[in-house]
Image (cartoon, grey):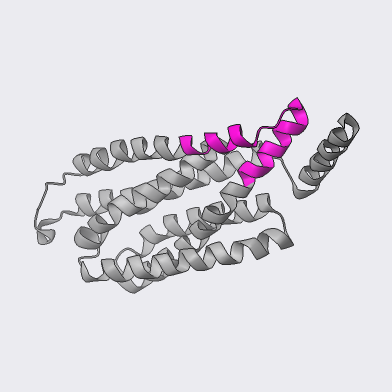
Amino acid sequence: VLLLADVARWTVNFVCAGSAVYFFTYVANNVAMFSVYLLVANIMAVIGSYLSKYVAAKLSTRTAALIGCYGLGVFLIGCQFVASNIMLVLIVLSCAQFFLGFLYALMVDLYGDASIYSEWKTGKAASSWVMGLSNLPLKLAIFIKGLIIPAMLAACGFVAKMDPAAATPELKAGITNLFCTIPGCTVLAGAVLLTFGYRLTTEKVKQYQTEIDTRKKIAE
């Protein structure tokens, strides 16, 4: 479940990054704002990543990650409704990147909790194995991105190096779906998987770690 949710997270990251230039060129008709978006998005992601640890400490790693997933999904989907207003687009996308920053920081902690659970259940250290698996979603997401972006662009009638002024309503709608709707729905699907499939709370993880430590002391 965690791997699937992480695939969703990386897919959103790569699809948004790969389709942003098309959105600002053919939908927003303002290529100059693309650079502004990149700057603001990176700043907001860093802020989100920094603040996420305080949210996780106050609530739990799982809860903070869910906040990040649902927040990211809601703002990405919401962006399609303000696509005609470039300033509102920047504001909404900045909020989305803030919540994406949560996931950058917290997914590693979720893998760490999963390794503790695995060791508690099997009696064997699993941190290396579990953390090694964390590279798999990254590779799968790159593959998925390579399928989604060309397919969506072709489906909405995009032609390489076409004049932005020649963009049809169908093309603009297709690019908006590629940049906002599809990533938003993808991360919300990942959020649902985490909500119902990832049940490791802070209390449970602490309990498992205590039992592991007790076993090791007995074994000595």
**Residue at x 54%, y 58% (from the top left corner):** 71
Magenta segment's dominant SS is helix
Would residue 16 appear left or right of 205 to someone viewing this image? Answer: left
**117, above or below 123, in the image:** below
Q: Quadrant of residue 91?
A: bottom left
Image coords of residue 111 (percent x, y): 61, 42
Image coords of residue 37 (percent x, y): 33, 67
**Residue at x 19%, y 40% (from the top left corner):** 154
Would residue 162 appear left or right of 210 to someone viewing this image? Answer: left
Q: Quadrant of residue 165?
A: bottom left
Residue furthest to the bottom in view is 87
**56, above or below 198, in the image:** below
Image coords of residue 182 (percent x, y): 39, 46
Q: Quadrant of residue 212?
A: top right
Magenta range: 110-136
In the rendered view of the protein, which quadrant contains the C terminus? top right
Q: How many numbered callouts?
A: 0
Instruction: Examine the rendering and report whether any part of residue 30 can be seen.
Output: no
